[in-house]
Image: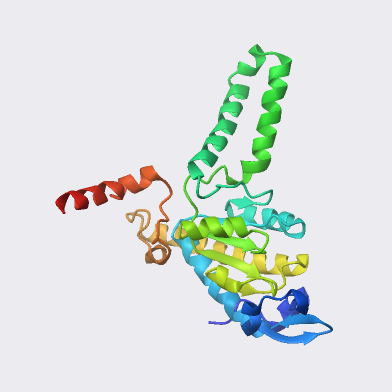
């Protein structure tokens, strides 16, 4: 199978430029090709291999019907990510990372439900029976919630994986994913520790051209996964959710979407029965 990208394409996107040598993280040493004018140059041959590895992982997750949460709050990445990720209908966070987004997911869902409640009030005529001041308050609240949680409104369960641009900036998201054993994929520059994530793509995470190119490759992989899932369903309409073996690799370590869901799968209840037998 041929690689998803080439050395020259990555070179043209500026993916090879790392940070100043003084800002490097020693853990990135295996991915650094050379130093030029005090700036580290990333080994793009290793980037190609890591891009293929990450893309295949994301493709499998998309094919299994699970959601991938894209995280990029830095200025030069947020618009790129939101624009490209919308095309595959995956959730994304491009404003400030809401603390507890993963570890306190139930509370985040309450905020999303609040948006739905306000929309319902607007549609059922409730707004016409309240004062102008109250309408303004609700409208402001709705706008604020939309900014914070609008892009994750369809995320009804924990994501199966995170894709992150700049793990140093998004360290809280990484920590929450780790705590819940959610696989992490990321663009990792020379100032970061690639061991913090499961699938690290060594590349420039500051240049918009580099970010756009790599995110595009990942989104294309997700599209492939979704397309194959559609074909699987057409060929095997009797098979239900989660029958695809591709999902098993990423389905361990507490990735169930909610407590209710794990109850249905025999999670906590099953453990209680085992304990009773002992």
| Frontmost residue, 164 versus 62 | 164
Outermost right residue: 37
- Residue furthest out toward the bottom: 34
Q: Quadrant of the C terminus?
A: bottom left
Q: How is the image coloured?
A: rainbow
Tell me if 272 is positioned left or right of 135 in this view: left
Q: Can residue 278 be seen from the camera position used here? A: yes
26 vs 118, nearest the viewer: 26
Identity of the residue drawn at 72% across and 72% down: 204
Q: Is residue 155 above or below residue 164?
A: above
Residue 133, percent across and down? Answer: 73, 17
| Depicted 132 relative to depicted 235: above or below | above
Q: Is residue 20 visible?
A: no
Report the number of discs: 0
> Which image quarter: residue 264?
top left
Q: Observer-nearest residue: 175 or 246?
A: 175
Point out residue 203 in the picture as x, y percentages from the top left corner: 69, 74
Up/down of 187 relative to 29, above or below: above
Residue 40 position in % (x across, y down): 75, 81
Residue visible at 52% across and 58% down in the picture: 177
Side of 244 where 162 appears, left or right = right
């Amino acid at each position: 199978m041929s690689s998803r990208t080439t050395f020259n394409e990555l070179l043209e996107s500026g993916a090879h430029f790392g940070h100043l040598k003084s800002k490097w993280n020693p853990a990135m040493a295996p991915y650094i090709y050379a130093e030029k004018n005090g700036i580290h140059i990333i080994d793009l041959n290793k980037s190609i291999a890591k891009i293929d590895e990450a893309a295949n992982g994301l493709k499998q997750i998309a094919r299994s019907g699970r959601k991938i949460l894209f995280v990029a709050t830095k200025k030069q990445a947020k618009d790129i990510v939101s624009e490209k990720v919308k095309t595959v209908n995956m959730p994304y966070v491009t404003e400030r990372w809401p603390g507890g987004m993963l570890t306190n997911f139930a509370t985040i869902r309450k905020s999303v439900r609040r948006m739905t409640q306000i929309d319902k009030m607007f549609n059922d005529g409730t707004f016409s029976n309240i004062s102008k001041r109250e309408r303004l308050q609700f409208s402001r609240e709705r706008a604020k919630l939309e900014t914070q949680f609008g892009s994750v409104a369809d995320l009804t369960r924990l994501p199966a994986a995170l894709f992150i641009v700049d793990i140093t900036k998004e360290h809280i998201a990484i920590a929450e994913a780790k705590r819940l054993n959610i696989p992490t994929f990321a663009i990792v520059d020379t100032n970061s520790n690639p061991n913090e994530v499961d699938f690290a793509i060594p590349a420039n995470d500051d240049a918009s051209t580099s970010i756009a190119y790599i995110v595009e490759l990942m989104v294309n992989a997700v599209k492939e996964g979704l397309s194959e899932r559609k074909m699987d369903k057409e060929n095997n309409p009797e098979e239900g959710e989660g029958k695809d073996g591709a999902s098993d690799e990423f389905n361990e370590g507490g990735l169930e979407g909610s407590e209710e869901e794990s109850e249905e799968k025999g999670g906590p209840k099953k453990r209680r029965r085992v304990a009773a037998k002992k």
